[in-house]
Amino acid sequence: MNYDAFFAEQLDQLRAEGNYRVFAELERDATDAPHATMHGADKARPVTVWCSNDYLGMGKSAFVRQAVADAALKDGAGAGGTRNISGTATQHVALEAELADLHGKEAALLFTSGYVSNWASLSTLGAHLPGCTILSDEMNHASMIEGIRHSRAGKVIWKHNDPEDLNRKLEALPKGGARLIAFESVYSMDGDIAPIAEILDVAEAHGAMTYLDEVHAVGLYGPQGGGIAEREGLAHRVSLIEGTLGKAFGVMGGYIAGSAVMCDFVRSFASGFIFTTALPPALAAGALTSIRHLRRSDLERRRQQANVAKLRARLDAMRLPHLDNPSHIVPVMVGDPFKAKFLSDTLLEQHGIYVQPINYPTVPKGTERLRITPSPLHTDEDTDRLVAALSDLWSQCALNRAVA
């Protein structure tokens, strides 16, 4: 078999479908966010980044960077191995305690990313809970789907954000065995928010455990940035809350928070925790600093929410279609992979605006979009330039102007 020919053929198929992805080489300057320098074959050019998941700009903040630098200089660049072999750094202990307190839980457990925390935790719980069936929202993230698949537990898919369908699916299951309901609070592509209270009502009526992914909500919602569950006073009813340190907290890593015995169980049985190098202590120190700041300060959240509202209003004024949702995620709907890529490429090349197209398999075919995430650091001038450029290109592509 000609292996490289096979790989090339598959890549050509992606290109033919408009789903081949090209990464821009960006040199970021923390003192000038959200602006950056893009390097290419011809020359370097300035760009404004509109699609970062560093939602609050915390990764650029001087005090978070200083915490990382101080810890790296004192303790070194890496963790030195797994926590089973190299031990647990004091920064890990402090960060886990802070995360547990943030969510009102007994304990927390760190992972190297949000993807790994979902994959490792769901696969471990599903594999070990006796007779387990995992009930998964149909729009759950790929990391959750992969963890469920790897667990080899029974799996039932329920309609997105539909507690009544969840209840029907639970009632149809045979008696006996564990039940684990897995869902997200804020869904990253459409920006919609789960009816958490209603889902918990169903779960409690059936004695089911609940697994809530808050990666696109922690830091952003709630009085202390504890997520949608904190905002709605529901965190105490959720069995396990999963989150990330790599989005609103601006650093890197993932975690779960729940009962002490459950976190200890995952720590003791999850291969994704046991056999991988631990999060560098310097990153844990940066994340701890970021979380502590956002628990005290609401300024970043208020500024971001104001910028989201401004962008939505200006898109509406130009009749540029975007999904109307209650979150910070602004999906501008294109509906064609080639036009989405053209819009993204032209925004970058002609206007110095960086926003990546979102296409299949991240979203269903026919729902391609530009996913825009305003931050507290974007200015009114940045917003005006983005909307003016989008409006001009919308006409060039002969796309419909209507509220999605």
Image (cartoon, rainbow, N blue to C red):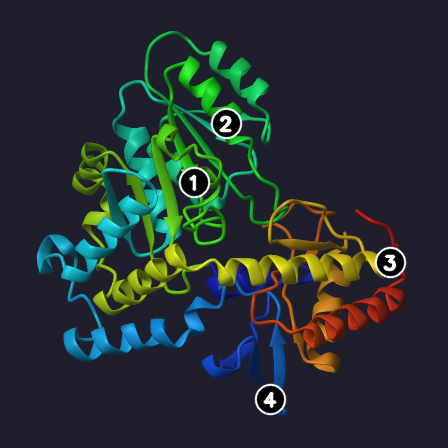
Q: Residue at x 25, y 44 (%)?
A: 108
**Figure quadrant of residue 267:** top left
First in sequence, mark 3 or 2: give its number: 2
| Residue type at the position of mark 3 | Leu
First in sequence, mark 2 or 1: give its number: 2
| Residue type at the position of mark 1 | Glu
Residue 92: x and y in percent read: 20, 57
Q: Nearer the viewer, residue 164 or 143?
A: 164
Q: Which mark is residue 197?
A: 2
Q: CA distance from mark 3 to mark 4?
A: 31 Å
Q: Is residue 156 visible?
A: no
First in sequence, mark 4 or 2: give its number: 4
| Residue type at the position of mark 4 | Ala
Q: Are marks 3 and 1 in contact (CB under 8 Å)?
A: no
| Residue type at the position of mark 2 | Ala
Residue 13: x and y in percent read: 64, 58
Q: Are marks 2 and 1 in contact (CB under 8 Å)?
A: no
Q: CA distance from mark 2 to mark 1?
A: 12 Å
Q: Are marks 3 and 2 in contact (CB under 8 Å)?
A: no
Q: Total number of numbered labels?
A: 4
Q: Please name the residue that numbered disc 3 is placed on.
A: 399
- Which circle, 3 or 2, is nearer the viewer? 2
Q: Which mark is residue 41?
A: 4
Q: Residues within 10 Å of mark 2 (few under 14, many from 20)?
A: some
First in sequence, mark 3 or 1: give its number: 1
Q: Please name the residue that numbered disc 1 is placed on.
A: 230
- Which circle, 4 or 1, is nearer the viewer? 1
Position of 374 compared to 25: left or right? right
Element at label 1: helix
